[in-house]
Image: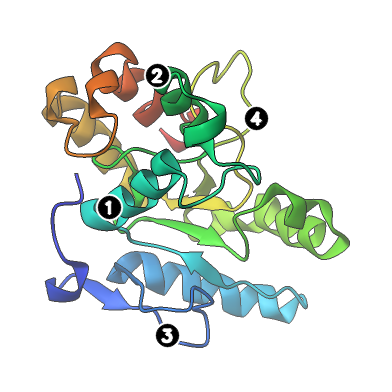
Amino acid sequence: MGKFDPAQRQDFVLIPAEYNIAGYKIYLRKETLYAFEKMAENAAKDQIELNITSATRNFDSQRDLWNKKWGGATLVDGKDLSKIIPDEQERFEKILEYSAVPAISRHHWGTDIDINSVTPKFFETEKGKKVYEWLTINAPLFGFCQTYTLKGSDRPTGYNEEKWHWSYLPLSKDFTQKYKNLIKDEDIKGFDGDEYAPFLNLINDYVLSINPECI
C-alpha cells in the first residue's frame, strides 16, 4: 500500500541520473532497475532512447498527487476539477481515468515505471510512435508488460490506456495476487475524497483490471 520510504529499503535502489528524467530522486526495486537497464541498452542499439519519468511512489507521494488534482492545485486536461466538477464522486471518477488513489497504485511496488512521458500526445508523435513500437515488440523479452492497454472486452474497467506504463512481471505478477488476497476495500483511506472509495469497487475494477497478459 506504499506506506514505506524506498530510500530506507535495502531492496530498492536510486535510479541513475542517465535514465532519470523526473527531475528528482526516484527509486526502483533492484531487479526492476537491472531489467530496465538491459532493455535500455538494447534499445539504444536500435537508436531508441528509453528513460524513466516516474517509478516508485510511496503512499505520501501518491496522496500529494491525488490531493492536488482533487483540490485544483494540479490541472487535469487544463482544468481545475474542483471548480468544474462540484459533484465529488464524479470528480473522484474523473481523476481515476489516469491517476490511482493512494494505497492502490502499482507504483507503490517498485515494479512499475513510466517511460519517457506520461502524456498520450507524446506517443502520437513520430518519436513516440517509434518508442512504443519498439516497446511492444521488445519489452516482453526483458520481463516488462504494458499494464493498461485500451479498454474493451478483455479490460472493461479501470484506467485509460497508458502507453508509458510498464510493469516488471517477474515481481509484479506475484504482488498483484498478494494484493488481491491481503488488501480490503476498507484499507483504502487517508486522502481527499476517501469517503467515496467504498462505492467504486477499486480493487476489482482498478487494481485487478489490467492487461490480461500482465496477470
- Left or right: 203 as drawn, with respect to 55: left
- Residue type at mark 4 is Leu
Q: Residue at x 82, y 65 (%)?
A: 127
Question: Which mark, residue 109?
Answer: 1
Instruction: Answer yes or no: is residue 97 visible.
Output: no
Q: Can you give x and y, in whole percent of width and height, for residue 208 in the image? A: 37, 26
Q: Residue 150 location, x and y as percent? A: 65, 30
Q: Residue furthest right?
A: 126
Sequence order check: which comes first, mark 1 or mark 4? 1
What kind of element bears circle 1?
A: loop
Q: State if disc 4 and disc 1 touch (CB < 8 Å).
A: no
Residue 85 visible here: yes
Give the distance between the C-alpha atoms of the residues marked 3 and 1, in whole angstroms.
Answer: 19 Å
Q: Amino acid at mark 3?
A: Pro
**Viewed as shown, does residue 156 lie left or right of 6?**
right
Q: Which residue is painted at 15% across and 26% down in the image?
A: 181
- Element assignment for label 2: helix
For residue 16, which numbered disc appears in the image?
A: 3
The residue lying toward the viewer, choosing from 140 and 178, is: 178
- How many angstroms separate mark 3 from mark 2 (CA)? 40 Å
| Disc 4 element | loop
* Mark 2 closeness class: few <14, some 14–19, many ≥20 residues within 10 Å: some
Residue at mark 4: 150
Task: Specify the farthest residue to the front.
Answer: 83
The 10 Å Cα crowd at callout 1, few under 14, some 14 to 19, many 20 or more, is: many
Residue of label 2: 89
